[in-house]
Image (tube, grey):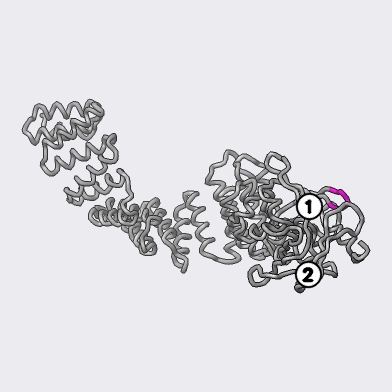
């Protein structure tokens, strides 16, 4: 004690005790730590925190403070950095050493104590090895008791260079280790830390990255991996740390808009949108984001419209964005809004503007095609737009193969049956043959009308194989057999239909046609009459022709 430096008494006030608790709020571990900044950032060993759901520290005055957030950790070297919710303006802290002590240098371990004394443990640096390329790991000639683990090891001038770690498998009465305090201090949260195994084993809230750019990456990753409540809490932290970044406000607004009927949540969202506009450097993006959210809100068809959030209001915000910068993505939204309003001529005008830019996409040409179709345009004009859509979608994959189905359907409407069949085949290849019975039914239709009857038979049989309960497939198989002159096979399929549904009127009409082919006129007329009784209006012409 007589030899301890005068600064020891004050330095020891930076050391504290830690108590961690599990999910049932039962004591999990206890250990030591120390402040390295006067605003509450501290270091300790990772082991004390592993599995913890909450933690508190008890300082040298016996005052208890909660651990607020984890700021970084390394399980291999058993170090952790965290923030304490301090209850005073500043806390006593140790300075991180900028120069490592040399081998043989005298060093001190500062234990946790609630007494005002200069009790310390002294020792010397025995060896220095490396953690990576930039940090040191120390072997110390020093006796270390269990309650001294994770206490600070300081140089003769009081700067902390290491975190005490107990020796394992060696003489613990003479040897201990210390991980670099600089290494622990440099542990940080990054944009990808949400997937860090060591951090995820601790239930205490994690801090945000020091870099605003990395914090934004973290928000992006967390949006798909956190519950909405957890994400809102993270956004609150982001806004507190980066109050001038508009994305925090827009993201919090969107996260608040969960319940269409929660007027209070929507009021908070509206306030966040307005704040985002105030702080944004690029206001056009915020105008666009607000417009898109109002548009999405209206698509959900709320019972009561919040604060005038109509399609027209969305247009107003988006036109503000367009007035600042005429970006294709803003044009696209105007087209979508007019489409939702059933104002197809205006929607097409905006979609065409997008298609004239270098950001034209399969989606933008598809939107134009569907709008043309709904406007009653010539089918060939629609097909031309779908051609552009599919040309931009190359190489065709399962993700964009649906465009082929759209074009196939339009080609069937224009009696381009064989071209439609080619689109169905291209779709089949794009999805690696992962299709259902409905696909085979539609492709059979194209093959049948394109007079490729064997392909039609193969496809309708495949549809039946995949769905034996769909009565329409058996009817279609009967039609194909009838068309190629296989009358007995057609009648056999119709018999299956009658067993499934004796009141299926179309089947009786087809049976009558088969019977005419067999020269069984009386039976045919009876079948036609049965079809008429069951409501088939298409049979009248056959009765007029064959049954008078």
Residue 370 locus on image (x, y percent): 40, 53
* Mark 1 or mark 2: whose residue is earlier in sequence: 2
Q: Residue sitting at 75 percent across and 59 percent down? A: 43
Front residue of this view, candidates 16 and 341: 16
Question: What is the quadrant of the N terminus in the image?
Answer: bottom right
Q: Nearer the viewer, mark 1 or mark 2?
A: 1
Disc ID at residue 97: 2
Disc ID at residue 147: 1
Give the extent of the magenta segment. 59-63
- How far separated are the C-alphas under marks 1 and 2? 24 Å
Residue 38 locus on image (x, y percent): 83, 61
Q: Quadrant of residue 35?
A: bottom right
Q: Is residue 20 left or right of residue 469?
A: right
Mark 1 packing: few (<14 Cα in 10 Å), some, or many (20+)? some
Q: Residue sitting at 47 percent across and 56 percent down? A: 347
The answer to whether residue 530 is visible is: yes
Q: Residue sitting at 59 percent across and 64 percent down? A: 323
Q: Is residue 378 left or right of residue 230?
A: left
Question: What is the quadrant of the C terminus in the image?
Answer: top left
Q: Main secondary structure of the magenta part?
A: loop
Task: Say whether residue 79 is magenta.
Answer: no
Q: Is residue 451 left or right of residue 137?
A: left
Mark 2 packing: few (<14 Cα in 10 Å), some, or many (20+)? some
Front residue of this view, candidates 24 and 480: 24
Task: Say whether residue 61 is magenta.
Answer: yes
Furthest residue in direction right, as rendered: 2
């Amino acid at each position: 004690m007589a030899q301890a430096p005068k600064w020891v008494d004050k330095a020891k006030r930076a050391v504290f005790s830690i108590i961690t608790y599990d999910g049932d709020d039962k004591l999990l571990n206890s250990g030591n730590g120390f402040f390295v900044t006067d605003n509450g950032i501290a270091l300790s060993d990772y082991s004390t925190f592993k599995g913890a759901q909450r933690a508190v520290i008890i300082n040298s005055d016996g005052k208890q403070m909660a651990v607020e957030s984890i700021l970084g950790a390394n399980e291999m070297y058993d170090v952790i950095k965290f923030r304490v919710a301090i209850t005073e303006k500043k806390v006593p802290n140790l300075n991180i050493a900028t120069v490592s002590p040399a081998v043989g240098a005298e060093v001190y371990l500062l234990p946790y104590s609630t007494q005002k004394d200069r009790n310390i443990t002294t020792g010397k640096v025995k060896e220095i090895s490396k953690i990576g390329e930039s940090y040191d790991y120390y072997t110390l000639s020093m006796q270390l008791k269990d309650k001294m683990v994770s206490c600070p090891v300081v140089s003769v001038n009081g700067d902390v260079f290491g975190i005490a770690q107990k020796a394992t498998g060696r003489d613990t009465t003479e040897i201990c280790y210390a991980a670099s305090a600089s290494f622990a201090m440099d542990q940080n949260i990054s944009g990808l830390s949400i997937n860090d195994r060591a951090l995820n084993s601790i239930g205490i809230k994690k801090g945000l990255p020091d870099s605003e750019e990395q914090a934004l990456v973290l928000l992006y990753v967390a949006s798909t991996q956190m519950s909405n409540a957890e994400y809102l809490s993270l956004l609150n932290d982001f806004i507190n740390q980066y109050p001038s970044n508009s994305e925090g406000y827009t993201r919090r607004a969107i996260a608040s808009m969960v319940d269409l009927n929660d007027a209070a949540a929507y009021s908070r969202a509206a306030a966040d949108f307005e704040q985002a506009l105030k702080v944004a450097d690029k206001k056009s993006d915020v105008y666009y984001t607000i417009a898109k959210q109002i548009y999405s809100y209206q698509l959900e068809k709320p019972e009561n419209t919040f604060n005038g959030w109509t399609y027209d209001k969305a247009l107003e915000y988006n036109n503000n964005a367009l007035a600042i910068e005429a970006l294709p993505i803003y044009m696209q939204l105007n087209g979508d809004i007019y489409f939702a309003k059933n104002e197809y001529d205006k929607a097409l005008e905006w979609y065409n503007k997008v298609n004239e830019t270098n950001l034209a996409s399969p989606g933008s040409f598809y939107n134009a095609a569907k709008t043309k179709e709904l406007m009653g345009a010539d089918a060939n004009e629609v097909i031309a737009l779908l051609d552009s859509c599919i040309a931009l979608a190359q190489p065709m994959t399962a993700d964009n193969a649906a465009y082929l189905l759209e074009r196939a359907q339009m080609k069937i409407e224009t009696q381009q049956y064989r071209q439609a069949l080619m689109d169905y085949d291209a779709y089949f290849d794009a999805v690696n043959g992962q299709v259902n019975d409905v696909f085979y039914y539609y492709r059979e239709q194209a093959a049948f009308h394109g007079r490729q009857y064997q392909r039609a038979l193969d496809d309708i049989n495949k549809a039946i194989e995949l769905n034996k309960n769909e009565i329409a497939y058996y009817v279609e198989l009967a039609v194909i057999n009838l068309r190629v002159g296989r009358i007995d096979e057609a009648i056999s399929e119709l018999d299956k239909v009658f067993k499934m549904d004796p009141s299926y009127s179309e089947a009786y009409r087809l049976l009558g046609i088969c019977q005419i082919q067999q020269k069984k006129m009386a039976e045919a007329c009876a079948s036609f009459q049965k079809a008429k009784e069951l409501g088939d209006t298409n049979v009248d012409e056959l009765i007029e022709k064959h049954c008078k």
